[in-house]
Image (cartoon, helix red, strand yellow):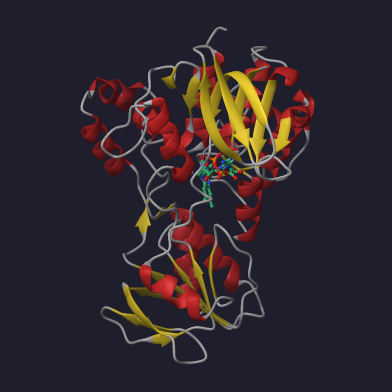
Amino acid sequence: MYKWIIVGGGIQGCTIAVQLLQAGKVSTQELLIIDPYSRPMHKWLSLTEKIGMTYLRSPFVHHMDTRPFALKDFAEKNDYTKPFLGRYKRPQLQLFNDHCKSLFDQLHITKSWHQATVRQLKSVGTNAWSVETDQNTFTTERVVLAMGVNDNPYWPGWAIEAKSHYPKKVSHLFTENSPPPSSVCVVGGGLTAAHMAVLLCENPGVEKVTLIKRHDFRVHDFDSDPGWLGPKYLNNYHKIISLPERRATIKEARNRGSIPREMFLKLKRLEADGSLKCIDDEIQDVSTHLANPLLHFKRNQSESFEGIYLATGSAQGLPEEIWLKHVIDRESLQCADCGFPIVTKQLEWKKGLHVAGPLAELEIGPVSRNISGARKAAAILSSISI
Ligand SMILES: Cc1cc2nc3c(=O)[nH]c(=O)nc-3n(C[C@H](O)[C@H](O)[C@H](O)COP(=O)(O)OP(=O)(O)OC[C@H]3O[C@@H](n4cnc5c(N)ncnc54)[C@H](O)[C@@H]3O)c2cc1C
């Protein structure tokens, strides 16, 4: 029997694994990380590479190690050039990834890695859980559900229609890899869309790049105010008893579809020199009788593109909703009106069953999905004594 099983080996799951091991709460033999991919953080690594991201949005103290200055020390020791950017010292992506890899190597995380997909979860008596994958069944004292939302892309209705007629010309950045044709649009107003648009503008094989977004650029350094990282806002947040009010607070606090100033300036420069066209409008419909999809806007004239990249984020709702709903019913797990778990301060949903990332949002607050949220979850879980 394992002590801890972590479902999902993305940033959330790996941060928890690292900090449980660093705290000596578990050995690699007592820990299992179950994830469908062969390597830790696969979704993060492939998505950030695909969009050509070079620096993180979050500051240098947001990383996997328990020690706040570990990333800075790692950068100095290994002599990185331009390791951090700007006044918030955003880390270089390569540096961040190398640091994660070095932690995984030091802690022998691969010994705890199991490539599979979890399909079922059942309590066994009062002190154990049985975790069923597409291959095996394992038992454990504690489980952490750390499935992210990046596996669950949001497809607007018009895009589903377009995809059914042009399967190779329409793709979502969260799931597919498709080479860019010469005239391409990116749909979305957030940082993923912005990175992709910049990358396409730098690609000599692409002649025309259009960024389609529903609103003006929203410029914010972070995707929520740094006050949400500590007591400044969290003290009041934790006093909110009404869960719909907590959900509304999270929604208001998150700067969805926003970009930091340096990215805004980069896009403005590309627009000014004619490399990038921006359309601020809503796509209402698509015509599918031509060689390429023809997009119809609310206000602007219709335009066709040889390729469409969706950067429309993830669908609302629980990660892995289908099997998780069965678990919720069978185990009588409590959920708020928004469908998300009601958990204790130890992020415990039921005895021995814990959550992290989006699933821990109502407890951790607006930063829960980010690296800082992963650090908070990891700190809480590694302080539990078993
Ligand atoms: C482009 C981009 C840039 C970002 N930059 C930053 C940043 O600079 N700073 C910051 O703090 N945050 C950033 N974020 C937000 C967030 O930190 C990332 O999205 C991060 O990858 C989320 O990690 P995760 O572990 O929740 O999800 P994921 O990376 O999606 O990992 C979850 C894992 O769980 C697996 N899983 C799902 N279902 C199952 C199952 N049934 N069984 C087993 N495994 C399963 C998935 O396959 C996946 O491997 C960024 C997000 C994006 C999209």
Looking at the image, which residue is at 77% across and 32% down? 110
Image quarter of the N terminus: top right
- Quarter of the render that holds ligand 1: top right
User: Which one is in front, 248 or 182?
Assistant: 248
Numbered disc total: 0
Res 60 seen here: no
Image quarter of the C terminus: top right
How far from the left and from the top, in percent, is residue 139?
A: 63, 22
- The image quadrant of residue 215 is bottom left
User: Which one is in front, 302 or 386?
Assistant: 386
Looking at the image, which residue is at 47% across and 92% down? 290
Res 140 seen here: yes
- The image quadrant of residue 257 is bottom left
Q: Is residue 217 above or below residue 230?
A: below
Task: Determine the residue located farthest toward the bottom in the rendered image.
Answer: 290
**Is 291 positioned to the left or the right of 223 in the image?**
right
**Is 102 positioned to the left or the right of 265 in the image?**
right
How far from the left and from the top, in percent, is residue 204?
A: 66, 78
How far from the left and from the top, in percent, is residue 221?
A: 42, 46
Looking at the image, which residue is at 43% across and 71% down? 159
Looking at the image, which residue is at 37% across and 54% down? 219
User: Which one is in front, 298 or 255?
Assistant: 298
Q: Is residue 229 above or below residue 194?
A: above
How far from the left and from the top, in percent, is residue 239?
A: 24, 20
